Every structure is written in structure tokens, then in C-alpha cells.
Image (cartoon, helix red, strand yellow):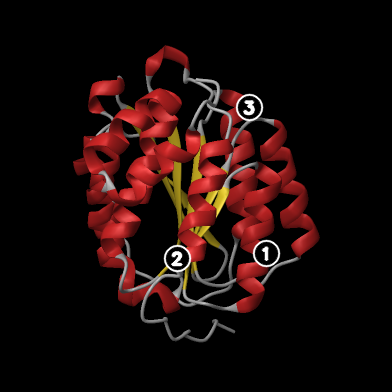
Amino acid sequence: MAKSKQRLPAKSSRADVDAFLQRLARTPAVRAEGGRGRLIFAMDATASREPTWDRACHIQADMFSQTAALGGLDVQLCYYRGFNEFYASRWVGNAADLLSQMTQTRCAGGMTQIARVLSHAIKETDRRRVNALVFVGDCMEEDIDRLFKLAGQLGLRGVPVFVFHEGQEPVAEKTFREIARLSRGAYCRFDLGSAQQLRDLLSAVAVFAAGGRRALEEFGKRKRGIVLKLTHQVGDSNR
């Protein structure tokens, strides 16, 4: 049975954003081989996320533009939907290619497949290092023990999972927070009222993946706001 739609809150929790920034500040930065960051951008494409899919398509473009001066960013799009359908794109190095793949995708009812996302990230980084995994979703309908084991394996491989939770489903929130913790990543709630906030945070993760904390500090000086707050939290961390 397809999951039911969840009502989104009016705006994001300040505490969630602060916690996300704190976790990102403590995440070890591992530079990509060849100087380009590698980031897996994974999304739930089941029916309940259809209202915000198009918005997410356009938000992702800033991940590329903000990392160009750092040597660039390679991104792989992953999503699940329908009856056991899971898709992983080729690695792309520009926003146009990724946007083309995303705009051709339509959401379809089905159960979550987060374990497949995490397992795929493990396989990818075993072939060639992945610097970070971003996951955007609103629900969880799987065995949590399996998810936690996979998240821990990503943490051991140095692949932090940055989870953006759309909505406020409590089981998903508990699970997503633990996935982020075990992988040494971060969790943040996303909603219809925080598109610019999500854009800035995604860009911050991309800059971090491509250039580490020093690049993140420079990005924060330009963007100010919540990203500048993040650079203050980094403080004297190793770069």
C-alpha cells in the first residue's frame, strides 16, 4: 500500500537547523580523489512527495555553482518509487544534466526503499570514494535495525549522510536522526516555507564535500545568514 500524504508544517524548526549546522561542523572532511567532490543526491520519489518534487529539482542547481571554484562537484542522482523501482544515474558534473534527469521523473506510489539508497552508497564508495550522501524524504517503512547497520557502515567508510526530512512524521524523524548520527552526518527538517534555507544548506554540504571546512568558511562569508553561523561553529576545527 502506498504511504499516505503528510501535512507539512508552516516553517522549519530553528532547533533543527542549529542541530544540523552543529553536526556538519563536526563532520570530518575527506578530500575527493582528483580534486572533485563526489556527492550522492538521493530522493524519495513516492507519491506523497510529488507536490515538492519540482521545487527540489531547481534547488539542486546551486550545489554546482557554489563548488565550481573548488575544482567542481560530481553528483549522482538516486531515487526510489513505485513497486520496488530504484534508479541510480551516471555521475554528472553540471546542473543542466542533473536537472534534465530530475524533470523527466514522475513520482509514483510505493513503499520506502531507504536501505537500497544506503547499500548503493556503500557500493559506490567501495569503488571510488564518495564524500557525502544527501537524502531527502518524508517517511520510513522499513526495518530500522537494517537501516542503522547500513548507516554505521557508511560512517566507518567516512561517508556522512545528510538527511533533509520533509514534514513531521515521528517514526521517520527518529529513524532519520539516528541514520545521521551513526554515519556522522546531520539531520534537518525541511518544509514548504524554507526553500531558500534548504538551498543554502544543500550548497553548504556541497561546498564542504568539495573543499572541506576552509572552503565552507569562505562560502559562509559570502552567504552569511545560517551558513555564516555554521562557519562560526567550525571555529578552530582541523581543516
Q: Eyeballing the image, is 131 above or below 196?
A: above
* Residue that sits furthest to the top in the current view: 34
Q: Amino acid at mark 2?
A: Arg
Alpha carbon of mark 1 to alpha carbon of mark 2: how far?
20 Å
SS at mark 2? helix
* Residue at (56, 72) in percent of width and height: 139
- The residue that mark 1 highlights is 175
Q: Amino acid at mark 3?
A: Asp
- The residue that mark 2 highlights is 14
- Point out residue 226 in the picture as x, y percentages from the top left corner: 35, 51
Q: Eyeballing the image, is 53 above or below 78?
A: below
* Residue at (46, 71) in percent of width and height: 46
Is the residue marked by circle 1 packed among few (<14), some (14-19), or many (20+) residues within 10 Å? Answer: some
Q: Eyeballing the image, is 117 above or below 155?
A: below
The image quadrant of residue 106 is bottom left
Q: Decide which of 189, 116 is in the foreground and name it.
A: 189
* Residue that sits furthest to the right in the current view: 145
